[in-house]
């Protein structure tokens, strides 16, 4: 079987093409400011999909196999375009940019055993896909989105979309000698000390700043799918369905709040292991009010393996 489809992605608020205002504050005074320049030519994104599949089934349904290869091409992506300050708004939304996804999915369902009273079926699916951004419009090579807590998501041309972008953590300085040997400073010129986070100095200038940010995680799994099994005895059936994902990274924002140690509230039990003496081997930096050395900044310290196996239905 072969299938071609063209779909429109309209899951965007209609206000993107209109004037709207947002609340803002300046020197303790609140007010409304224009937040958008309208674009009456804005249209839905278009996704062109091509799918080629094969279904195989044995006589008696003892074995069923499905194979699918698909390719999705997204055009007219809705993205913000930077504007001159003369417009009174930082950006407006336009149709620009493209990305392409190639994927494959295989499903197998087999009857392991069957007779008059008893039957056992077992099935599984596995899928893998790869997405690459081919254009961000107007010669733009990368776009960085900053979340409300300072975490950053980067999308680059020629790479996967929506990857985590921040500093790479190499651990915690256990001793003063170790910190002095590294000889690193923050962007204000303050030297990192024992108990501070050890960040990788990417550009070799001995200063940890925005120029040392790299891709620190990818939320896209290497592969994902499901597992299904059912047991039948006469008129009674017991079935279970599992889903799984492997190789995807997640950002644990909750743990970041609970282990940041920037103030006196809301800390997790794990902060008891924070660095507090010379030579202390730990992955938890020292507690210092206000976090002057940005030990709780967005880094690979907060990126975790998001692989899972979940019982979805029983």
Image: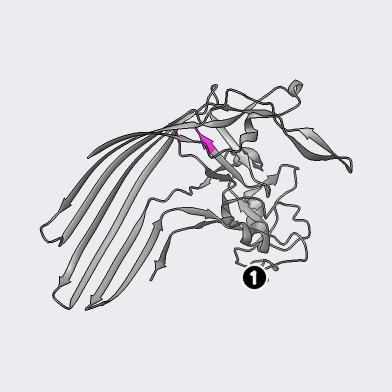
Q: Where is residue 21 in the image (x, y as percent from the top left)?
A: 75, 35
* Quadrant in the picture for residue 85: top right
Query: In the rendered view, would you say 35 is above or below 87?
Result: below
Q: Which of the 4 quarters of the picture holds residue 269? A: bottom right
User: How has the structure been colored for display?
Assistant: one colour
Q: Can you see residue 205?
A: no
- Which residue is located at x 58 percent, y 56 percent? 302
Is residue 303 left or right of 174 when viewed as pictured?
Answer: left
Residue that label 1 marks: 273
Lateral position of residue 129 relative to residue 68, left or right? right
Residue at 76 percent of width and 52 percent of height: 292
The residue closer to the viewer here, 302 or 39, is 39
Residue 267 seen from this side: yes
Query: Mark 1: which secondary structure?
Result: helix
Residue 117 is a magenta residue: no
Which of the image's four quarters has the C terminus?
A: bottom left
Give the image location of residue 158, x and y in percent.
44, 32
Give the vertical position of 89 relative to 271 (above or below).
Answer: above
Q: In this view, does 192 lie to the left or right of 57?
A: right
Q: Give the range drawn in magenta.
A: 155-159
């Amino acid at each position: 079987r072969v299938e071609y489809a063209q779909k429109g992605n309209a899951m965007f608020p209609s206000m993107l093409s209109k004037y709207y205002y947002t609340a803002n504050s300046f020197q303790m005074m609140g007010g409304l400011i224009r937040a958008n320049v309208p674009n009456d030519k804005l249209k839905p994104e278009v996704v062109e999909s091509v799918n080629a599949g094969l279904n195989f089934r044995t006589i008696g349904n003892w074995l069923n196999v499905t194979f699918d290869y698909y390719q999705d091409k997204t055009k007219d992506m809705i993205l913000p375009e930077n504007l001159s300050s003369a417009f009174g708004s930082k950006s407006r939304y336009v149709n620009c940019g493209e990305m392409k996804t190639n994927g494959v999915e295989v499903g197998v369902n087999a009857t392991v055993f069957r007779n008059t009273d008893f039957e056992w079926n077992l099935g599984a699916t596995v899928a893998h896909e790869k997405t690459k951004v081919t254009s961000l419009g107007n010669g733009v090579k990368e776009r960085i989105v900053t979340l409300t807590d300072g975490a950053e998501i980067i999308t680059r041309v020629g790479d996967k979309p929506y990857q985590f972008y921040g500093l790479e953590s190499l651990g915690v300085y256990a001793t003063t000698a170790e910190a002095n040997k590294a000889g690193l400073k923050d962007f204000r010129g303050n030297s990192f000390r024992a108990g501070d986070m050890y960040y990788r100095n990417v550009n070799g200038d001995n200063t940890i700043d925005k120029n040392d940010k790299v891709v620190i995680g990818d939320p896209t799994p290497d592969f994902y799918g499901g597992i299904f099994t059912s047991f039948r005895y006469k008129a009674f059936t017991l079935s279970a369905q599992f889903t799984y994902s492997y190789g995807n990274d997640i950002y644990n924002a909750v743990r970041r709040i609970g282990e940041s140690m920037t103030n006196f509230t809301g800390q997790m039990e794990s902060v008891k292991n924070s660095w507090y003496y010379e030579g202390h081997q730990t992955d938890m930096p020292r507690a210092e009010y206000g976090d002057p050395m940005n030990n709780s900044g967005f880094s690979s310290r907060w990126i975790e393996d998001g692989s899972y196996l979940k019982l979805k239905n029983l």
